[in-house]
Image: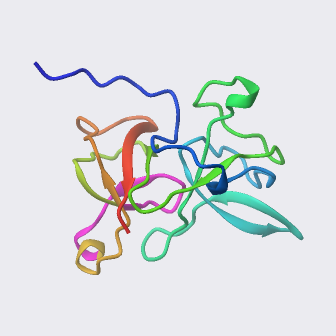
Amino acid sequence: MPLETHAPNTVLLSPRDKSFIYDNIPAGEADIRPGMLVEPFNNSGVLAWRKSSAAAGQTSMFVALEQDIQNLPIDTPYAIDSEMPVASIPIGGRWWGLIASGQNIARGPLQSAGDGTVKAATATTATANVYHFHALESSGGTVNALTRIRIMRVA
């Protein structure tokens, strides 16, 4: 009998290492959710985080963490200008990421969707070897809402 997999209620599924967590930089845009890929940017002279904008090729390897110090649920989005703890994901690192509505994810190669979420790697990106992530589980069919999935960085 297979073991039932439960929701982990935390974003970072690899061991936490304080040297990889950055938490004094504010959220620079609305609706950043824990588990999204994020990137630093210059927000009118202030370093801030935004959802990763790269869909293919080089993407940010930073992931927004949950607001556990404020005792907020894992799906609570960040307010603009609030400090946002972010983890740098090393190769082999795992997290509980997000896929957008309309995606049907099977175990296998993933790439950034360009909006903080991930999507299945296309034949073009797989051939060009620019996918950076791997789905550790399937979505169970096409999802109709923002959905969490276990992800591992592979490149």
* Magenta residues, start to end: 111-124
Give the answer, above or below, for where 88 lies relative to 58: above
Residue found at x 73% / y 53%: 29
Q: How many marks?
A: 0
Quarter holding the N terminus is top left
Residue found at x 35% / y 63%: 154
Residue at the limit of the structure toward the bottom, as seen here: 128
Residue 34 drawn at (x, y percent): 59, 41
Q: Judge by depth and name the residue closer to the eye, 148 or 133.
A: 133
Residue 71 drawn at (x, y percent): 70, 23
Left-right relation of 7 to 23: left
Left-right relation of 109 to 69: left
* Residue 119 counted in the magenta span: yes
Residue found at x 41% / y 42%: 101
Left-right relation of 155 to 9: left
Residue found at x 45% / y 60%: 113
Residue at the limit of the structure toward the right, as seen here: 45
Q: Judge by depth and name the residue closer to the eye, 23 or 122.
A: 23
Quarter holding the C terminus is bottom left
* Residue 18 counted in the magenta span: no
